[in-house]
Amino acid sequence: MNNNEINKLMKDAQKKSGIDIGKMKQAADNGKLDDFINQNLSKDATKQLKSVLSDKEATKKLLSTPQAKELMKKILGDKAGEK
């Protein structure tokens, strides 16, 4: 997946969800991602997201996809490649 495809994916996700990816990244950087999610997602979407994130195996599976890895690199920059 190249940068143009990632940008398109992020723009599409932003359009469909109505969530500003830049503001989400800023909230994550400030340690306020949970507040951002609660304010910007429906109750059902918040519940589903938290359910996946609280299940270690489901989270691992989700984050291991190439698309998720590329998206995380785009959102987090060089921080995503560290470990």
Image: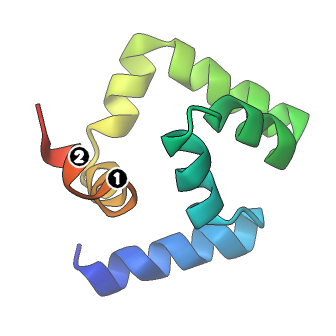
The three-letter code of the residue at mark 2 reads: Lys
Q: Residue 69: x, y in percent?
A: 27, 50
Q: Residue 11: x, y in percent?
A: 56, 78
Classify residue 41 as left or right of residue 30.
right
Q: Crowding near pointer 2: few (<14 within 10 Å), some, many (20+)?
A: few
Residue that mark 2 sits on? 79
The extreme left residue here reads 83
Classify residue 46 as left or right of residue 26.
right
Figure colour scheme: rainbow
Q: Residue 5: x, y in percent?
A: 35, 81
Question: Which residue is found at the position 47% from the left and 73% from the top?
Answer: 9
Query: Where is 10 relative to 75, above or below?
Result: below
Taking depth in this image into account, of 79 and 7 the one nearest to the observer is 79
Q: Residue 59: x, y in percent?
A: 42, 25
Query: Where is 32 relative to 13, above or below?
Result: above
Question: Which residue is found at the position 81% from the left and 48% from the top?
Answer: 40
Taking depth in this image into account, of 22 and 16 the one nearest to the observer is 22
The three-letter code of the residue at mark 1 reads: Leu
Classify residue 26 as left or right of residue 36.
left
Q: Are marks 2 and 1 in contact (CB under 8 Å)?
A: yes
At mark 1, the secondary structure is helix
Query: Where is 66 relative to 52, above or below?
Result: below
Question: Which residue is found at the position 53% from the left and 53% from the top?
Answer: 25
Q: Disc 2 versus disc 1: distance between alpha carbons? A: 6 Å
Residue that mark 1 sits on? 76
Classify residue 63 as left or right of residue 53.
left
Residue 48 bears which disc, if any? none
Tell me which corner region of the image, top left, top right, bottom left or bottom right, holds residue 46: top right
